[in-house]
Image (cartoon, rainbow, N blue to C red):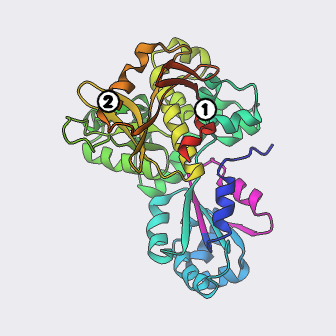
Amino acid sequence: MWIERHIEPLLLQRAATRPVIVLTGARQTGKTSLMRHLFPEHGFVSLDLPSEAEQAEQDPAAFLARHPPPVIVDEVQYAPGLFRHLKIVVDAERARPGAFLLTGSQPLTLMPAMMESLAGRAEVMELEGLSFAEARAARPRLTVQDFLVRGGFPELHANPAIDARGFLQSYVVTYLERDLRQLLQVTSLRSFERFLRTAALRSAQLLNQADLARDAGISGATATAWLATLTASHQLTLLEPWFANQNVAMAKRPKLFLRDAGLAAFLCGVHSVEALRDGPLAGPLWETLVCAELRRVQAGRLGNWQFNFWRDRSREADFLLHRGGNFHLADAKWTENPRPRDATGLRKVAAMLPPGSVATMTLFCRANHAWPVTPDVTAAPLGDVADSPHWA
């Protein structure tokens, strides 16, 4: 079953105007399937096959002779030497849009080579996992609680019979075995898995790197390197605080979020909706999911909003989006019926921003429909993130 992705129109538009498209993202987010679905007339080759990767790296001219444009090259990070030759070919056919469609899931090795060789020639786009709206379009009975625990990997929703716990366990093992051995030459995969689980338990919290390293049993320097790797391989994101107000003592540390709430729940030992409801992690995991939804809709629409959070000594907003002097403020609330007091934090932050600059204030919760909590703050279901025109 094909699940339509919100990024499809943007990807088609970019491929119609640019000679090279590079689609990045974590493993299993559907990069290859999306490219082959949208561009069925293109040739296809995967550098997951060692023989293809070796020729692409050692003899790119022969490789491209075998796979002429228009072509999709999958997992292109396995042959960074190919980029130098692509530059020559692209410059010779600069007027040919969509000639090379590349995918990659390891930007630590992909991006330096690409930026050096294809600067000004390639459009880089990122594919996130499914949003709740995308998954629900395929599975109309899907609830937000089920989506949170199951996560946004497309295969889990294209085939609902797949056991999510087994899939996510295999995903972690594959990530550790394939990506980390190549990226960091990690000698103790067990230590890294413990670090990954420790990070998941801190999702939606301010990053305290010293505490994270101590609890994972590693050095501070190792924690720094491993955080960078998790970020670059699209497993987590560090949301920076808003700093523009110079008259307020603002938080200086970023917030840590795993990118997929289902993976975060799995790593935290939350394997069912019942465990989610009865446990202490519902709030942080809900905030993790809302963060992912806001980030996904931005990537799908290329909204270019600056994405932050606000925290000072007395005020907090989970999410702050800013562009051109306009703001959207949002909080994540694990409740079906937020009360006016739940809007207090957003209203306090709004009072610190320039008059008239705050376009919307929203409490993303488990409500079935949007409704006003106060005259200026709206309670909204998760699906409204994708439906809202505000993030375009």
Q: Which residue is mark 2?
A: 351
Q: Can you say which quadrant of the picture contains the N terminus?
A: top right
Question: Is residue 26 among the parts visible in the rendering?
Answer: no
Position of residue 209 relative to residue 37, above or below, is above
Classify 10 Å Cα crowding around label 1: few (below 14), some (14-19), many (20 and above). some
Name the N-terminal-most of marks 1 and 2: 2
Looking at the picture, which amino acid does disc 1 mark? Asp
Is residue 135 on the magenta stretch?
no
Classify residue 91 by image quadrant: bottom right
142 and 229: which is toward the camera: 142
Q: Which residue is mark 1?
A: 384
Q: Position of residue 111 (x, y in %)?
A: 47, 65
Contact, mark 1 vs mark 2 (Cβ under 8 Å): no
Q: Position of residue 178 (x, y in %)?
A: 54, 52
Classify residue 309 by image quadrant: top left
Q: Position of residue 318 (x, y in %)?
A: 40, 31
Q: CA distance from mark 1 to mark 2?
A: 25 Å
303 and 119: which is toward the camera: 303
Task: Kindly identify the residue that appears in the image at 75 percent across and 43 percent down.
Answer: 3
Range of residues picked out in magenta? 21-47
Q: Is residue 78 left or right of residue 240?
A: right
Classify residue 61 by image quadrant: bottom right
Task: Kindly identify the residue that appears in the image at 72 percent across and 79 percent down.
Answer: 68
Q: Position of residue 39 (x, y in %)?
A: 75, 63
Task: Kindly identify the residue that appears in the image at 47 percent across and 53 percent down.
Answer: 181
Position of residue 124 relative to residue 150, above or below, is below
Give the residue furthest to the bottom: 92
Task: Kindly identify the residue that appears in the image at 60 percent across and 23 percent down.
Answer: 370
